[in-house]
Amino acid sequence: MEDCCRYCMPCLGRLWNWIWPEFRYPNVPNHSSGDVIENPATEAARISTVSGDVSVPSPKKRPVQLYAALFDFEARSNDELTVKEGDKLSVIEKRGDYVLAKKLTGSLQSGLIPANYVALLQDEFAKHKWYYGNINRVKAEKLLLASQNKDGSFLVRISESHSDEYTISARSEGKVYHFRIQRSSIGAYFVSDKISFATLGELVSYYQKNPRSLGVPLEEPCAQQRKQ
């Protein structure tokens, strides 16, 4: 009868679905019988497919990023952290113009440090005065347009859209220009696909000596704004 009704009057499909439901819901586990899922995440880690159960891999833990202190900083309150230039740190979170950081050597203390006193340490880039690590475009422009900087001032920062790439931000004629530094399939650094470099330092050095290739001069690293 069901097949006949569905065939002859398909426009009443909603009625037939109500009378003869197509889907059967699974029985709800009876908690009183002890049939209880103690850890729903464990159940969700397996997905049933036509070819059998497939295990879903656990999400990978994000590796701890290593930072370095660029300058000495003396704590002025119990919330702040005293660091020496070169101290290795892990940054827990950003708080306005400060970061909550933890020392990775010595006392292993944690506390607040001005955000521009630390730099993400990748391939020893933090040793360069022009390397400003993980700052955004707005912050870079603010630093470069500050009174202590002039045309030719520049910095290198981590790209906001690609964490494995970088950006040169340079001041010229009172404006700030940004140039994306990309990575090739073999790890070389380049701004133009006409020439690439084995290291970030080599790329910066080349454009300092050949400003016409970039279009703006790279004369002096951006002057760091220190907290008083």
Image (spheres, rainbow, N blue to C red):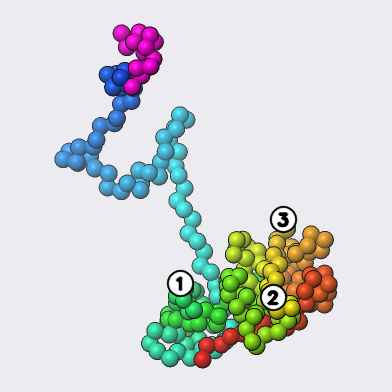
Identify the residue at horizontal 40%, vertical 89% (top origin).
77
Which residue lies under the disc numbered 3?
Answer: 185
Decide which of tag 2 and tag 3 comes sooner along the chain: 2
| Disc 2 target residue | 175
Q: Secondary structure at mark 3?
A: loop
Residue on which the image places disc 1:
93
Residue at the spot 45% in from the left edge and 38% down from the top edge: 54
Report the magenta residues as a range. Answer: 1-14
Q: Residues within 10 Å of mark 2 (few under 14, many from 20)?
A: few
Q: Amino acid at mark 3?
A: Ser
Q: Looking at the image, which residue is at 77% across and 67% down?
A: 197
Check disc 2 and give the amino acid type.
Lys
Task: In this rendered view, identify the residue nearer to me: 143 or 43.
Answer: 143
Cα distance, mark 1 to mark 2? 31 Å
Q: Position of residue 227 (x, y in %)?
A: 52, 88
Q: Nearer the viewer, residue 101 or 55?
A: 101
Q: Counting residues from the N terminus, which is met first, the one under dot 1 or under dot 2?
A: 1
Pointer 2 with pointer 3, Cβ within 8 A: no
Q: Distance between the Cα atoms at labels 1 and 3? A: 32 Å
